[in-house]
């Protein structure tokens, strides 16, 4: 069906915007990046940028979230294929997140140093919250109060995100 196809120009534009924001955010905090900076680096107009995003930070969060979400899809596929036990899936998942943080280390380092870029850190917290929620949902004892479940999830999520923050600051 022709209607289901995405115009290749749109795909190229989105990829150019994503590359541009990562390149720029690797050099300075997202709060210091303007729409004009991103548009110029991507070779598009500011109007084109605003057709898709409201701010450079929104674009950056979209890129980081999409990369982490892809890691989650990979983890779920590993879990479902039956070839990996729970310990192997956990080890591979931690490796996937470490790979993500390593690839985007400069972006996270700039964001952690700038309070205006708190949304970047929150992407990690959301990632770890989703993963902890899934693990605790499958392994928590029956009858565990929801409040206890939420405390455990937040403990793991903020603990892992804090460990990443310390790792990047080292």
Image: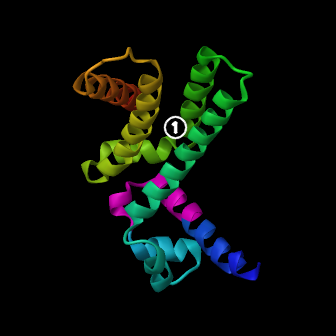
Q: Is residue 20 magenta?
A: yes
> Which residue is at the far front?
143
Please state, as top left, top right, bottom left or bottom right, where the C terminus lies in the image. top left
Please name whichever residue, 115 or 74, is drawn nearer the observer in this view of the structure.
74
Magenta segment's dominant SS is helix
Q: Which residue is under mark 1?
A: 101
Q: Is residue 155 left or right of residue 131?
A: left
Q: Quadrant of residue 83?
A: top right
Looking at the image, which residue is at 43% across and 37% down? 130
Residue at 52% x, 37% y is: 101
Q: Is residue 144 above or below residue 115?
A: above
Residue 62 position within the rendered picture, expressed as x and y whole percent measured from the top left: 47, 57
- Residue 49 sits above or below residue 108 on the image: below
**11 sits to left or right of 157:** right
Magenta stretch bounds:
18-33
Q: How many marks?
A: 1
Image position, residue 67 (x, y; %): 56, 48
In-image side of 135 versus 7 (left or right) = left
Q: Position of residue 10 (x, y in %)?
A: 63, 77
Label 1: how many residues lie within 10 Å, few (<14), some (14-19) or many (20+)?
Answer: many
Magenta residue check for 19? yes
Which residue is located at x 30 percent, y 29 percent? 154
């Amino acid at each position: 069906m022709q209607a289901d196809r995405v115009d290749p120009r749109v795909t190229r534009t989105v990829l150019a915007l994503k590359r541009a924001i990562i390149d720029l955010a690797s050099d300075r905090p997202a709060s210091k990046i303007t729409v004009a900076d991103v548009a110029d680096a991507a070779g598009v107009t500011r109007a084109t940028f605003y057709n898709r995003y409201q701010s450079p930070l929104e674009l950056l969060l979209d890129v980081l979230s999409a990369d982490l979400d892809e890691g989650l899809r990979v983890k779920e596929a590993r879990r479902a294929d039956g070839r990996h036990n729970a310990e192997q899936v956990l080890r591979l998942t931690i490796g996937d997140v470490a790979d993500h943080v390593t690839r985007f280390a400069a972006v996270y380092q700039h964001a952690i140093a700038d309070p205006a870029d708190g949304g970047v850190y929150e992407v990690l917290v959301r990632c770890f919250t989703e993963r902890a929620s899934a693990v605790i949902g499958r392994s928590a004892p029956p009858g565990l109060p929801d409040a206890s479940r939420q405390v455990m999830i937040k403990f793991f999520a903020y603990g892992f995100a804090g460990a990443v923050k310390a790792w990047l600051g080292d």
